[in-house]
Image (cartoon, grey):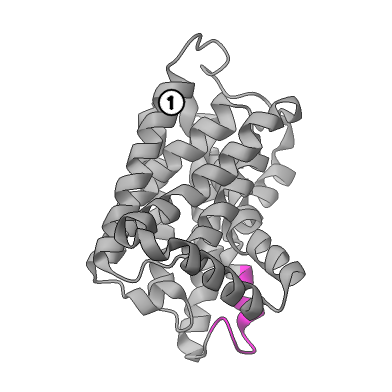
Amino acid sequence: MSAPARQLVSFGLLAFSISWTIWAVCLVSGQDVTGSSITWLFAIGASGPTLAAIALWIGIRRRMPGIATSWRRAWLWAPLALVLGLAPAVLAALVQAPATLGERLVDGTNSVVAASGGWILFVITYLIAGPLAEEFGWRGFAQPRLRTRFGLVGTSLVLGAVWAVWHVPLYLLNGTGQHETGLLTLPAVLFFVGCVPTSTIFLVLSERLRGGVASAVLLHLALNVGLSVLPLDSTVGSALYLGWTTVIAVVVTAVFWHAGSRTDATSPATA
């Protein structure tokens, strides 16, 4: 087994062990994981991918390929990450009820910010819960190693599938949005499928546009905010969200990955 393959296996085992073991404890407790004394424990579990990446970086730093962030190109990847992250939720809501989109955006934003305890806590919470907790692992560690072997489509399929499976316990934990949806439902299936085109968007922004982990954090932040402000309250909404995500993945791939010279996208940059 090659070094990148061994590193991927180690990362996967460690990330899933941290997250699923801790979430199993939360499940046995029966408490609401977002509004009780075990919220901090749930948060540690949610940070499994990043914690696993950090542990492996410390252990094998000298042999660690990764993706570097080009801050000179932040004028391109930063706004794109925010726009593309918000777009699926906004477009799905626009198709369903165009006349009330503005009202839903205002009401949804006010509700989410109020529930977070104000704008400062809102930004901190949404940055940590998902973006910082996961992206150093998924996109910073796993993605560049997969890319050396599988390319754009293969990496999106493999990482998207792993990312989807990692989310499964969230559907069993009281207090999560996934628990409200239910595991054995069509919206859940649509979410799992959507992890693949979403992974494609992450890959293009972080590698082709040299946004690195920073762009992945911004994109994940925008995705979470979009779904919180404009929640998918029906199967139709979930289907529209998946459809728009897929369209966006195809467009950004065609425009940024395949257009022009590919010399700066054929291999991951070193971190």
Magenta segment boundaries in residue numbering: 33-44
Q: Nearer the viewer, residue 240 or 61?
A: 240
At label 1, the amino acid type is Arg
Q: Quadrant of residue 125?
A: bottom right
Total tally of numbered discs in the picture: 1
Q: Is residue 112 left or right of residue 251?
A: right
Name the spot of residue 206 as percent of width and height, x first: 58, 34
Q: Residue at x 73, y 69 (%)?
A: 119
Q: Residue at x 58, y 68 (%)?
A: 109
- Check residue 266 for magenta coloring: no
Q: Residue at x 70, y 32 (%)?
A: 74
- Residue 69, can we see it? no
Q: Residue furthest front?
A: 99
Regarding mark 1 in the picture, which secondary structure is present there?
helix
Name the spot of residue 112 as percent of width and height, x first: 59, 73
**Which quarter shows the C terminus?**
top right
Q: Is residue 25 left or right of residue 258?
A: right
Q: Which residue is mark 1?
A: 149
Name the spot of residue 201 as percent of width and height, x first: 46, 38
- Residue 28, can we see it? yes
Q: Nearer the viewer, residue 106 or 84?
A: 106
Could you classify mark 1 by the number of other residues whose Cα lies within 10 Å: few (under 14), some (14-19), or many (20 or more)? few
> Please, is residue 34 above or below residue 139 in the view?
below
Q: Residue at x 75, y 25 (%)?
A: 72
Q: Is residue 105 left or right of residue 251?
A: right
